[in-house]
Amino acid sequence: MRSKLLVYVNGRFVKANEPAISAFDHGLLYGDGVYEAIRKYGDKIFMLEEHIERLYESAKTLRINIPYTKEELARIVKQTVEKNALKDAYIRIIITRGYGKMGVDPRGCVEPTVLVMAEPREPIFSVKGVRAKIVSIRRIPQQCIDPKAKTLNYLNHILAKIEALESGFDEAIMLNEQGFVSEASTENVFIAKKGMVATPPLSAGILDGITRRVVIRLAKELGIQVSEVNLTPHDLYNADEVFLTGTAAEVVPVVCVDGVKIGSGEAGPVFRRIREAFETLVRN
């Protein structure tokens, strides 16, 4: 299936299985670039403007000048989906620093590489629930790499995911250097307790997730109190509910953490209300 998909690369569409970027591209050599993941539901590309805005902010932090306006890039995203005739799609925009000499000095990279791809993709977890592990891998401190920038370098998250999988769990939850809950490998973390919702603040070293923003807004519209506070493993173990949010995962419950059953061990009432509101939003 993927071999038949068309990918946008620097002004042209190529087959997904054809070589399209240089072996000397700094995105490949050093993970030097930024990206966004976006979902399309039916005729709606969900939160496209917000994703593109964050992409440009990430690129600015890395001193990468995207060679398109935001409006031009949005049109390219829509063209990519249309050319692949996808009703529901998982879309990725990748901007690398581009082709250059070996070495981390970016001055030899003349023009960024722009890729846009889309494929059909189901949510990465079952809505029946996720078994999570608090891993030993700590989230990279935000004093080192600002988590607000969504970069190509995901090694921190990959190592966390590997540890969770090798331990027999579905997903990793990372703590920050202070021992507070940060985020999962590709999701933000929420808990519900006594009908109220809490999630780590941005200062915990987390990505300012687009789906996180949506869920906070939906919860408030439902009359659910939401607080952004530092959470500990103790808070997760003793929560009535734990759930994760992200573009790939959407909104999914966590049924156990480190083998400790969360609440009833299945999706709880707060999660179900938020999930229903999320489904209504993306499908209508």
Image (tube, helix red, strand yellow):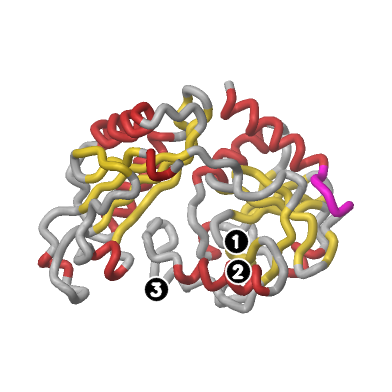
Residue 73 position in % (x across, y down): 27, 36
Measured in 3D between alpha carbons, the distance from the residue under mark 3 to the one under mark 1, in whole angstroms, is 19 Å
Residue 59 horizontal side relative to residue 103, left or right = right
Magenta extent: 264-268
**In the image, which is nearer the foreground, mark 3 or mark 1?**
1
Residue 236 position in % (x across, y down): 75, 62
Three-letter residue code for mark 1: Ala
How many marks do you count on the picture?
3
Three-letter residue code for mark 2: Met
Mark 1, secondary structure of its residue = strand
- Main SS category, magenta section: loop
Measured in 3D between alpha carbons, the distance from the residue under mark 1 to the one under mark 2, in whole angstroms, is 6 Å
Front position in the image: 172 or 2: 2
Residue picked out by circle 3:
144
| Residue drawn at (26%, 53%) of the image | 19
Three-letter residue code for mark 3: Cys
Measured in 3D between alpha carbons, the distance from the residue under mark 2 to the one under mark 3, in whole angstroms, is 16 Å
